[in-house]
Every structure is written in C-alpha cells, then in structure tokens.
Image: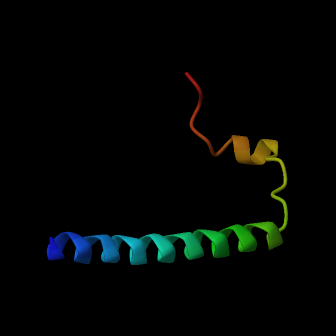
Amino acid sequence: MNEQKARDDELAKIRSEATSWLAKMAQTQHRRPKAEPRGPEHEAMTPAQQ
C-alpha cells in the first residue's frame, strides 16, 4: 500500500511540473510574432504532393 502512495505522490509531482511547463510554453507562444504565410520559394523546398 505504501508503494502505491509513493507512486501516486511521484505522479502528482510530475503532473504539476508538466502543467507548469505547459503553462510557461503557452505564455511564450503568445509573445512569439506571427509566422508569415509561406511564399512560393518555400514551396519549392517541400516534397511534391502525390
């Protein structure tokens, strides 16, 4: 039973770390400038569609 509690505690810790990391990523996402639409010069670099 004690092992289960230890695993649950570990999971809760990881979950809260992941949540705060995701929140941080979401904030930096908003600050990033919008990507420009890809121009024809970029299309030439992508593989041809089949």
Considering the image in quadrants, where does the C terminus appear?
top right
- Image quadrant of residue 49? top right
Q: Viewed as shown, does residue 45 lie left or right of 9? A: right
Residue 11 in the figure: left or right of residue 31: left
Q: Nearer the viewer, residue 16 or 6?
A: 6
Q: State the residue at coordinates (33%, 76%).
A: 9
Task: Using the image as rendered, state which of residue 5 and residue 26 is in the foreground.
Answer: 5
Q: Position of residue 8 (x, y in %)?
A: 30, 70
Q: Is residue 44 above or below residue 1?
A: above
Task: Name the residue furthest front.
Answer: 1
Of residues 41 and 22, the one nearer the viewer is: 22
Q: Position of residue 48 (x, y in %)?
A: 59, 31
Quadrant in the picture for residue 1: bottom left
Q: Is residue 47 above or below residue 9?
A: above
Residue drawn at the location 45% of the way across and 70% of the way down? 15
Q: How is the image coloured?
A: rainbow
Give left or right: position of 29 versus 49: right
Identify the residue at horizontal 80%, vertical 67% (top origin): 30
Which residue is outermost to the top?
A: 50
Residue 10 position in % (x across, y down): 32, 76
Residue 35 sits in which quadrant? Answer: bottom right
Q: Which residue shows up at 84% across the image and 54% down it?
A: 36
Q: How many marks?
A: 0
